[in-house]
Amino acid sequence: MGLLRCRRTRAAATGATAVTALAVLLTLGACSEEGDAPRPAVGSAAAGPKVRGEESVADFLHRALPVGAGGTVIAARGDELTYCGGFGAADRASGTPASCRTVYDVMSITKQFTAAAILKLEVMGRLRVSDRISRFLGPVPEGKRDITIDQLLTHTSGLVEALGDDYHPVARDELVRQALASKPQSAPGKEFHYSNTGYSLLAAIVEKASGEGYEPFLARHLFAPAGMERTGYVLPRWPRHLVAVEYDSEGRSQGRPIDHPWAADGPYWHLRGNGGMLSTAEDMFRWHRALSGNEVLPEQARRKLFAPHVRVPGLDGSYGYGWAVRETPTGRTVWHNGGNDWSLAYLARSLHDGVLVFWVSNHAYQDGKWNLEDQAEDLTQGIADRVRAEDR
């Protein structure tokens, strides 16, 4: 599977690094502990027993994951949870192992929640994706007056990739002002330029169109119907010990995502709407399950979410609304990744057979030894292949 490279450098004064398209991303390489089994509330879970001589998911991960990496993997087929387990440590200082209950920053995977919120508002009659952003964010300068919500969703607005550091204290209206005053990379609708700024504007539109805060709207209209009680910015109030510590490429602790400068209601607006959402592997399974039915969005809206709206240069595929899209001989696969200097996450769904693979690592890079970003496709495809083998 190919995917977008959406890595961002948090420490840089200018914010996230430029984003390029990649055809592949990663294969994890030699696991420690398998971690906790998922709680029964998620559904039927399995540790991945061998089926008819095939290598199990657990055995594959034990062979593939590099020593020192930490994180969680979940795999499913339709409503059936096939595997969920942690590897390495969620917190080395306390000796807490990673597990299915560990809370991680899912980074740019946040974009699919923002996109779903926009489509929910369209279903509710509050907006249309064809609307110009001036309806909600006006007045808009002449060069940006033709930007539509659809173009923000598909990274074709021409807006810059980022305007500042993720943790710089900037409020919503100031972020909007900066975005509208920024130098465009291209005319609206002409070219694909991955833009975190564009997704922050979408979060602002969610607030303007709904009359609610961004996270409260998602919590009420997306997460609650999906049964996702451990996903959000601040509303879930997770026990601190369940939130993973992130580690840099030299193995040094960078603290938990909630330790970084945030506003009282979540991250500042260079990050809000485009990244920074916290979640668990179990909740990502619930999200997958909700997107397979009508709990969150009706079928027509889900078709929009996963439609290949615009080709992505250099990528074997297209971009939908918050999802990358690839057509395969057996059907459509949708995915997205997220990353920063420390962590990496990948979510892939095969729409034709309902196979889900989600993994996230709180220590994804080790100088001179391994880099999960170099191995993404083999890891994700290897897990998916073993899920499918169980039905043979």
Image: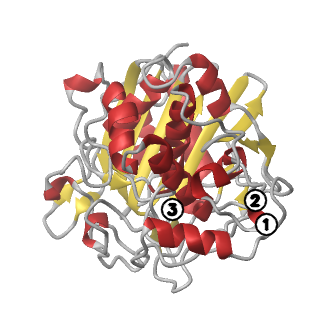
User: For the residue carrying disc 2, how many other residues have a C-alpha within 10 Å: few (<14), some (14-19), or many (20+)?
Assistant: some
Q: In the image, what residue type sits under mark 2?
A: Arg
User: Vertically, is 34 above or below 315?
Assistant: above
Q: Position of residue 189 (x, y in %)?
A: 82, 53
Label 3 element class: strand
Q: Where is residue 13 in the image (x, y as percent from the top left)?
A: 51, 86
Question: Is 243 in front, or is 219?
Answer: 219
Label 2 element class: loop
Which residue is labeled 2 in the image? 145
Label 1 element class: helix
Q: Can residue 378 be seen in this view?
A: yes
Which residue is labeled 3 in the image? 339
Q: In the image, what residue type sits under mark 3?
A: Gly
Q: Residue furthest bottom?
A: 13
Q: Do the residues labelled 1 and 3 touch (CB within 8 Å)?
A: no
Q: Do the residues labelled 3 and 2 touch (CB within 8 Å)?
A: no
Q: What is the spatial separation of the Cα atoms under label 1 and label 3, in whole angstroms?
A: 34 Å
Look at 46% across and 65% down and name the residue there: 271
Look at 64% across and 41% down and name the residue there: 321
User: For the residue carrying disc 3, how many other residues have a C-alpha within 10 Å: few (<14), some (14-19), or many (20+)?
Assistant: many
Q: Position of residue 266 (x, y in %)?
A: 32, 61
Q: What is the spatial separation of the Cα atoms under label 1 and label 2, in whole angstroms?
A: 5 Å
Left or right of 38, for residue 67:
right
User: Vertically, is 265 above or below 220?
Assistant: below
Left or right of 269, for residue 280:
left
Which residue is labeled 1 in the image? 142
- Which one is closest to the eye, mark 1 or mark 3? 1
Q: Position of residue 117 (x, y in %)?
A: 49, 39
Q: Are marks 1 and 2 in contact (CB under 8 Å)?
A: yes
